[in-house]
Amino acid sequence: MPTSALPKNRFERRRAETRQALVRAARQILAETGDTSASIQAIAERADVGFGSFYNHFESKTELFDAAVTDALEEFGQVIDACVEGIDDPAELVAAGFRLTARMADSHPELLRILRDRGLAHIHSERGLAPRALRDLEIGIASGRFSCGDATIALSALGGTLLSLVALRLDRPDLDGDEAASDLAEMVLRMLGLAADDAHEVTRRPLPDLAR
């Protein structure tokens, strides 16, 4: 789960723990069934908190499930960040995002199921992988590494392609995920303006292991 500064006192810690338990329960529901019609009582029971605690943190189930998606997106971004630390080439960062995401079907299946089902509405979100990808695209364009003109438009193309990869990886567990992700990342880099040989080499560089 995404981490933040620890609350200063016991009351604040307990309050934060209760909120996180509710968010965790909502994430589990989204990943398992996607059914947001679950009752508040059922959510509270899954979170192992009192029914009345719900309204101390959220005004509605919609607010809770929105918070759960945001939480999942931010964890997704943090996982990728931890793996690509030290990589400076924007092309390699884009490729690594695709390739690591494919591997997360095994290491972080809950995150990928939420991303598959809820990600389209968050391609331009201020949380998760989107702002990181936009930053890398802007750096790539400014440096001349990418020849596309508009980073936001490029992000739309990358986001849609990444979501397709996620759906493919989850729906076809028999498929070679690494190979599919590398091939797709190579196509994306060529779309961004890299030469064929360059795109192929970048998408075959060694990847760090994903922490579970």
Image (cartoon, rainbow, N blue to C red):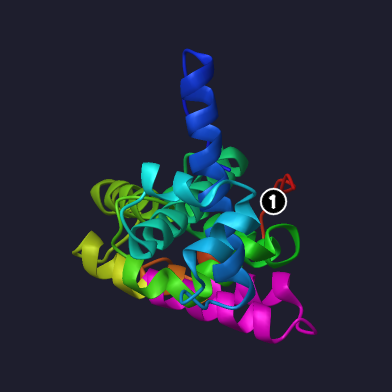
In the rendered image, the vertical position of residue 189 relative to residue 92, given as above or below: below
Q: In the figure, is residue 27 to the left or right of 149?
A: right
The part of the image, by quadrant, that contains residue 159 is bottom left
- Residue 87 visible in this rendered orientation of the protein: no
In the rendered image, the vertical position of residue 41 relative to residue 2, given as above or below: below
Spot occupied by residue 6 in the image (x, y as percentages of width and height)? 51, 21
Residue 178 sits inside the magenta stretch: yes
What number of labels is visible? 1
Q: In terms of secondary structure, where does tag 1 sit?
A: loop
Disc 1: which residue: 207
Spot occupied by residue 96 in the image (x, y as percentages of width and height)? 57, 56
Front-most of 93 and 74?
74
Residue located at (64% from left, 58% from top): 46
Q: Residue furthest top?
A: 8
In the rendered image, the vertical position of residue 1 relative to residue 92, given as above or below: above
Magenta stretch in the rendered image: 158-185
Front-most of 161 and 147?
161
Residue type at the position of mark 1 = Leu
- Residue 193 visible in this rendered orientation of the protein: yes
- Neighbours of disc 1 within 10 Å: few (<14), some (14-19), many (20+): few
Q: In the figure, is residue 5 to the left or right of 66?
A: right
Q: In the figure, is residue 66 to the left or right of 200?
A: left
Image quadrant holding the N terminus, namely top right
Spot occupied by residue 165 in the image (x, y as percentages of width and height)? 56, 77
Spot occupied by residue 128 in the image (x, y as percentages of width and height)? 42, 52
Residue located at (53% from left, 42% from top): 20
Predominant secondary structure in magenta? helix
Residue 176 sits inside the magenta stretch: yes
Residue located at (24% from left, 48% from top): 142
Front-most of 174 and 121?
121
Q: Residue furthest right?
A: 174
Residue located at (52% from left, 24% from top): 13
